Amino acid sequence: MALQVYNTLTRRLEPFQPLAPPWVKMYVCGPTVYDRAHIGHAMSAIVFDVIRRYLQYRGYRVVHVMNFTDVDDKIIQRAHALGVNPFDLAQQYIDEWFDHVRALNLLPAHYYPRVSLIIPQIIDMVQGLIEKGYAYEVDGDVYYRVRRFPHYGELSGRDVDEMRAGARIAVDERKEDPLDFALWKAAKPGEPAWESPWGPGRPGWHIECSAMSYYFLGEQIDIHGGGTDLIFPHHENEIAQSEAFTGKRPFARYWIHNGMLQLRGEKMSKSLGNLITVADFLAEHEADVLRLVVLSSHYRKPLGFDDKVVEDARRGLERLRRALRPSRGTLTEGEAVDALVEQVAQAREGFVAAMDDDFNTAGALGHVFTLVRAINTARDAGVGGEPFAQAVATLLELTHTLGLELHAESTVVADAVPFIELLVEVRSALRREKQWALADTIRDRLAQMGVVLEDTPQGTLWRWA
RNA sequence: GGCGCCGUAGCCAAGGGGUAAGGCAGGGGACUGCAAAUCCCCGAUCCCCGGUUCGAGUCCGGGCGGCGCCUCCA
């Protein structure tokens, strides 16, 4: 079985065959940096991080590009409202994004292009489109001539003749056709602007991704990713621009789109006031919890997000972590060992089969948890040494492929550790004297402070609740 | 109105013609001084109605319900 990927372009599962193996060129649409990133952005980033990790696990070499849209109406508006420089505002959110990349354990992209730094390349591309007859200038604006591109609508399944452009917004009468979209916008007073053959102005939204993709990855790429909300018009327009410019198709071989995160059944949006920022989430939860929530359902489906789902993930994460506890057993052969070895092999096989099926992380997790049970059973049965170590190593191999860290709890309260250990020691002495009441008091009081004690045959273990 | 997605146990969720993975919660048991952790056991007429088939959550048609996009959006 080989890797199969669902391609939005064909609406089918297809065998994954990059243009030039082992290289995989992957471009993912990043955020418009006019505000803090929310967990929906994080979900998308995690989805493509997992896709990248799995491709690498399968031996591919991924070149990953993610853009920042740092020139945009909303940024300009916001900067005006706050009385700050739009570039400073954008920079602030870009800095925060990189904080999130570290905190969320995302593999950094190889390139992070931003609009403001590739204006000359964008101008070249717009100029090229005009020369080829795919674009025209009107009063300093440049528009793409949609009807000139025969494949328009292919990605989003739309028929050009049935689209009701302007149904919800006023049509700009200067455009040849209501469907035409802006490649370049003439500068308005007080806006950032760059000199161009059509006068001062700034790029339209869609052209940046075509330009960045072209300049960083070449005429054709393997994977183009983003949220389903970008399929139309953004990605449709990208195809029109890129393919018209290069004359090559397909611009991207595989279009991969993640479903939207929904907060308590509704879309997250500012107007509904139900937006959770990444910073808010990380202030209360670990990054692995968010990642496990994302991994628990398929990336193409809408992700239901609420307190229950988060709590379930938190507990599931605990279970994963506890499986990593060492064994004090010494058995290295026999029935229990054979069973473990067998289950380890099955888990890896099942994991790969699930991930090969369009990155079915939820199915893959099922196999991971089956491995967890096998490890716990083996530990209880006294299995130790190399076979046990191998099983744990496999668990780490699989969870790391999903990007889970499984790090021990935070060290924020590390100063308390010696005191906790002292109390545990004292309590152990009390237990030897069968002073149950006092021993239980210590355990209860520690529990109130968030420290859980577990008495095992090998002694007392403790952990943060 | 157009394009598309989804409806599987209390909750989350995989599977997509051969008789229902996994996680969380719950019940019972083993272990434990009691707990905790761990392990074992227990739970589903797969939204409804038709059809195709030896056989249908799984394919087809029609309903009902929820959602996304069509305008900036990951």
Image: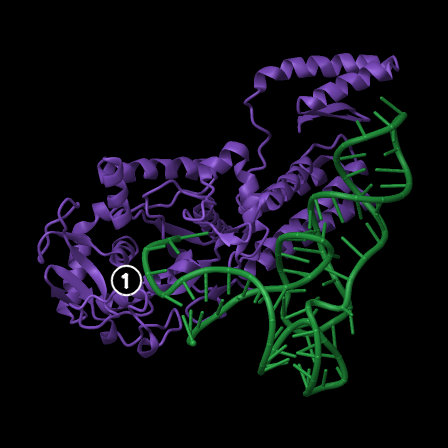
Chain colours: A purple, B green
Q: Is residue A3 above or below residue A449?
A: below
Where is residue A81? Give x, y as percent.
26, 39
Where is residue B63? Give x, y as percent.
60, 76
Q: Is residue A166 above or below residue A433?
A: below
Q: Secondary structure at mark 1?
A: loop
In this view, the residue in front, A183 or A379, is: A183
- Residue at 13%, 47% (x, y): give it: A189
Crowding around mark 1 (Cα neighbors within 10 Å: few <14, some 14 to 19, many 20+) is many
In this view, the residue in front, B45 or B21, is: B45
In this view, the residue in front, A190 or B13, is: A190
Residue picked out by circle 1: A219
Where is residue A94? Give x, y as percent.
33, 39
- Residue at 34%, 35% (x, y): give it: A95
| Side of A167 relative to A289 (left or right) | left
| Total marks in image | 1
Question: In the rendered image, which quarter contains the N terminus of chain A?
Answer: bottom right
| Side of B43 relative to A131 (left or right) | right
The amino acid beneath tag 1 is Glu
Q: Is residue B70 above or below residue A453?
A: below
Where is residue A238? Give x, y as percent.
30, 63
